[in-house]
Image (cartoon, rainbow, N blue to C red):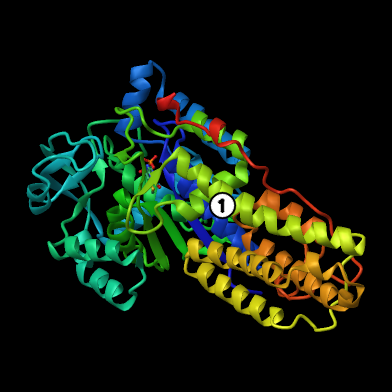
Amino acid sequence: MSQPACITTPIYYVNDRPHIGHAYTTTICDVWARSQRMIGRDVFFLTGTDEHGVKVEKSAQARGIPPQELADENAAEFQRVLATFALTNSDFIRTTQPRHVEQVQTLLRQLMKTGDVYLGTFEGWYDEGQEEYHTENRARELNYLSPISGKPLVRATEQNYYFRLSAFADRLAKHFADHPTFVRPVERANEMLGRMRDGLQDVPITRTNFSWGIAMPDAPGHVVYVWIDALLNYITALGLGTTPSAPESKLRDRSRYWPADYHVVGKEILWFHAVIWPALLMALELPLPKCVYAHSFWIADGQKMSKSLGNFVDLPTIERYTSVYGLDAWRWYMATQGPLAATDADFKAKHFHEIYTNDLVNTVGNCPSRVGAMIGKYFGGKLPSDSHNGGEWPHRCKATVDKWERCMEVFDLVGAARAGMDLFHQVDVMINDTEPFKLAKDPANTPRLSSILNQCAQTVRIAGLLLEPFLPQRMADLQSAFGGVGSGKSDWSSRKKYGAIPDGHPIEKIALFPRVDGAIAVQPASAG
Ligand code: ME8
């Protein structure tokens, strides 16, 4: 049995409605989760909602409803989106669930016992929007303005419980040095190292100025800071904060999924995940995640997406894209054109349309349709035999599958997608070079024609397989049109093998991605 796999999204704030940012992170995690399931790993894919804190409390107040009601409403909306987008998360954790609350309290008690959490007084520069304190150096660098909202940082003093982050500076530095891929991409790791060199100060982890949060155990009036509560979701979902006698201890069965392979987060919340979270885990004597992957941002037509500009690609806009182009097309654009690297990605309707047309209509759709049509026309829709045992193709396919596996392992989704596309392109090249439609004119060419089309079909099946995590709906159609062999039930080693479609097997001509008229291409809500 291969190693269990675990991937997580951030848990999303319930004071917001789902938008492209949430859809993006969750979709790329879903692509990876599907890929690992496909190769036979036992996958735990976690997402959920972050329901406590001042922001949620204030939004609820503004609407005149209790915070729990706002949380229930928006958590349901996030869950609805997961279902309509066919996202395959294993669990959905909500930080107001008793299973989470109880474990957070257990874990904090443990930290108080070890002395990693203590009562002290703190004064610092506070970003009210982000609920985050900055050091003097950092605040100066930021011109005493929030890097997110641009609003002034405020000077704040509190008597609070602290996490002894400063005690972990050396161990963190060593962990970064020993594990160069702990934080990716490398630009982001360097940023974290730079900030760590400024020194690490203890972090206040409770507040007394609001009540919408988890009560600090044995400390009346103190509420756990939302970020500490939120980070712990990654292990409470796996039952790592349970005591053997607690009712939720059955969650312990999930402990095999820890440490996570990937925490996928946006770059704005990397400090919490790359510095505070590992230190907390060290204090709890738990292993660290293998990689914290920080993607960049989607921007819109060259501008930062923001609620005040009204240019956020929101859910209704996303749903218009999926209704015009299909869900798979949306996933494809997210996964192959998104801000996975250290630079932001621009979301443009025109670009979306071009990618759809070039990649999906003209390549992934057209190639199988050509191959299926020729097998239909020249061989009555039955796979002809190949007297050459695949020629170069078994080797080429294997090399590509190997490459895809390596890309997926390191979360190089773009590289993995390119590997699949590359096989489709190679089949197109073979068709263009050998011109089967000309060969078909002379019966003397039948053995050659038969080999070529067999090789095309076998290769198309494998190309489709590699794109299945990205395009699950259409690639399932492709698999069934191309012999229906090696479908989801078979194991990976037989599915990935060249030549799995037996001679004589029916091959259908299919239309996977209909051409969309550019004129009706979707415009973002704000533009039209
Ligand atoms: O930060 N482009 O939740 P959140 C790409 N609750 N991704 C984007 C994006 C954009 N323009 N905008 C947002 C929180 N995201 C905390 C997390 S985790 C223990 C607690 C994505 O609802 C990106 O993944 O503000 C980012 O990290 C996340 O949404 C923030 O979601």
Q: In which quadrant of the rendered image does the N terminus lie?
A: bottom right
Residue plotted at (43% across, 34% down): 313
Identify which residue is drawn at 61% across, 34% down. 323
- Which image quadrant is residue 490 in? bottom right
Q: Residue at x 21, y 58 (%)?
A: 164
> As rendered, which of 259 and 35 lies closer to the eye?
35
User: Which is more toward the observer, 479 or 380?
Assistant: 380
Q: Which residue type does callout 1 highlight? A: Asn
Ligand 1, by image quadrant, is top left
- Whether disc 1's CB lies below 8 Å from ligand 1 is answered no
Using the image, determine if residue 364 lies above or below residue 157: below
Left or right of residue 55, residue 149 in this image:
left
Q: Residue 120, percent across and down?
A: 15, 49
Where's residue 185, x and y in %? 34, 64
The residue wearing badge 1 is 358
Residue 395 spot, x, y in % from top left: 67, 82
Q: Circle 1: is it few (<14), some (14-19), or many (20+) Cα within 10 Å? A: few
Image coords of residue 483 (percent x, y): 83, 62
Q: Is residue 227 above or below residue 318?
A: below
Describe residue 94's horizontal placement relative to residue 284 as left or right. Answer: right
Q: Residue at 71% x, 80% y: name it.
A: 394
Q: Quadrant of the C terminus?
A: top left
